[in-house]
Image: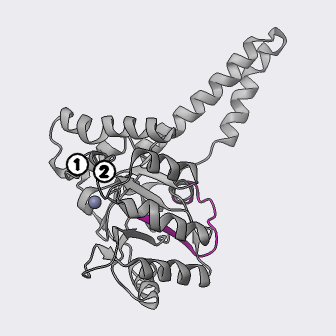
Amino acid sequence: MKSINIKYLFTGTLFLGLVFSGCTNSKKQEGNSAKATDSVAMDKPVANTSAQILAKPEVPVLCYHRIEEGKKGEYKVSPATFSAHMKILADSGYHSILPAQLYDYLVYNKTLPEKPVMITFDDSRVEHSTIAAPVMEKYGFRGVFFIMTITYNKKNYMTTDEIAALAKTGHVIGLHSWDHTMVTKYNEAADWQKQVIAPKEKLEKITGKAVEYWAYPNGVYDHKGAEELNRYFKISFSLSTKRDTIVPLQSVRRMIVPEWTPQGLLKSMRRTFHEAKPLSKN
Ligand SMILES: [Zn+2]
């Protein structure tokens, strides 16, 4: 919670700063600054506590990796299966949401569209841009692409231009570390610099947008890592593991999607996110 309050305070301070600087331009308005402060205080959005965030119904968050033909595996679906998954989501009335909407829902109780789902992709594979994005766009969906930045312009991975194009088309680009080293292995400041700070800055230059979301390599996190990431990201996504009770926004659950039938996908979404008892650790 501390971080949310800090974020709010920052926004509040920024806003007050604007009010005050506006006032200094007109001497007549000097006496109004106290009044302006009051109205800002009244408009202050109240952020949910960690316990309130954990108690809210979860939104299904899907996690895809490879989209290609070939041997079945946990980290792979065929292009036809991916299309069938998107089709059944659309036919069933699902609306894709983006992380900023999820954040406002979890922290400020903003309403989400009916039947929300988030569709995410890990590891910067080229087919995310060539296959997944066009299929999603056909249904009016937008996704979240978590980039491990060591892959820029490498064979089978997205080019920096393709990543920038996704951001331009309304998809969201997040970070998935530099080289997929797990957060639990970042021991020194230099590790955070290499895996988080430097790649985040680079990705922001490529997309021209703030990179505010993180997906844990291998889905693995610990409390120390979650606290640290809270300095850099609004939300970090784990996998179907227990959530952190102190910084729940840094451990939002996702579900890996393998080669399921469309009905199997819907069933797993229900089982993992709607019927699951709230989980938390520490
Ligand atoms: Zn990964």
Q: Which residue corresponds to the image point at 48% horizontal and 46% vertical from the top-left?
A: 164
Give how far across and how far down residue 221 sits, in percent: 24, 56
Q: Earlier in the sequence, mark 1 or mark 2?
A: 2
Q: In this orientation, which residue lies closer to the viewer: 155 or 187?
A: 155
Q: Is residue 42 visible?
A: yes
Label 2 near label 1: C-beta < 8 Å?
A: yes
**Above or below, comparing residue 144 to residue 117 in the picture:** above
Q: In this orientation, which residue lies closer to the viewer: 141 or 105?
A: 141
Give how far across and how far down residue 85 sits, in percent: 48, 80
> Which element carries disc 2, helix, strand or loop?
loop
Tell me, for residue 148, which label it has, or none.
Answer: 2
Residue ID for mark 1: 179
- Does residue 115 appear to the left or right of 228 in the view shown? right
Give how far across and how far down residue 219 sits, in percent: 27, 62
Local crowd at mark 1 within 10 Å, few (<14), some, or many (≥20)?
some
Instruction: Pick out the residue farthest to the right.
Output: 28
- Image quarter where the C terminus lies is bottom left
Local crowd at mark 2 within 10 Å, few (<14), some, or many (≥20)?
many
